Image (tube, helix red, strand yellow):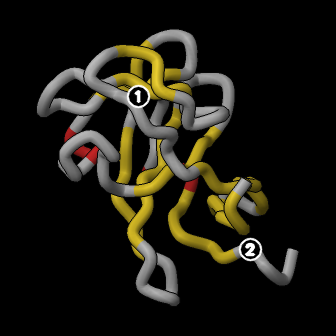
């Protein structure tokens, strides 16, 4: 777990919520609670670089960008709905002692 970093408390991320965070290395990410797990993805939508934290968590473990409606699978980062074409970067996540820990890219 040495490569994991605590970025938020679990109580900061209720089901259906998104939270923008920054790692100690300055990397910007979005944490998402899809109801089944906590996920972490890159902060900006690959379509037009709009902040994904301003979007929505949708049923089935998806995230939707608020700008143009691009949708991605939170587990894999794969694009699911036009205009999404490029895969999101996803990160490993663990929850320990009430903290959300984010690790290396998945």
Residue 49: assigned label: none
Residue located 38% across and 36% down the image: 17
Place of residue 94 in the rendered image (x, y in percent of width and height, measured from the top left): 76, 55
Q: Position of residue 26 (x, y in %)?
A: 42, 85
In the rendering, at what x and y percent does residue 6 appear? 62, 73
Against 34, residue 106 (above or below) is: below
Q: Secondary structure at mark 1?
A: strand
The picture places residue 106, in percent across and down from the top left corner, at 73, 53
Q: Secondary structure at mark 2?
A: loop
In 3D space, how far apart are the residues under numbered discs 2 and 1 (Cα atoms)? 23 Å
Q: Residue at x 44, y 38 (%)?
A: 86
Q: Earlier in the sequence, mark 2 or mark 1?
A: 2
Q: How many numbered markers are drawn?
A: 2
Label 1 belongs to which residue? Answer: 63
Residue that numbered label 2 is attached to:
4
Marks 2 and 1 close (CB-CB < 8 Å) = no
Q: Is residue 43 above or below residue 58?
A: below
Characterize the local packing of mark 1: few (<14), some (14-19) or many (20 or more) Cα atoms within 10 angstroms.
many
Q: Locate residue 82: give its quadrant.
A: top left
Q: Quadrant of the N terminus?
A: bottom right
């Amino acid at each position: 777990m040495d490569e994991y970093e605590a970025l938020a408390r679990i109580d900061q991320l209720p089901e259906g919520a998104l939270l923008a965070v920054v790692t100690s290395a300055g990397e910007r990410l979005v944490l998402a609670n899809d109801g089944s797990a906590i996920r972490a993805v890159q902060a900006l939508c690959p379509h037009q670089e709009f902040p994904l934290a301003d979007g929505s968590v949708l049923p089935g473990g998806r995230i939707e960008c608020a700008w143009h409606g691009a949708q991605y699978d939170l587990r894999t980062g794969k694009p699911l709905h036009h205009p999404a074409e490029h895969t999101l970067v996803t990160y490993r996540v663990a929850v320990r002692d009430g903290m959300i820990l984010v690790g290396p890219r998945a």
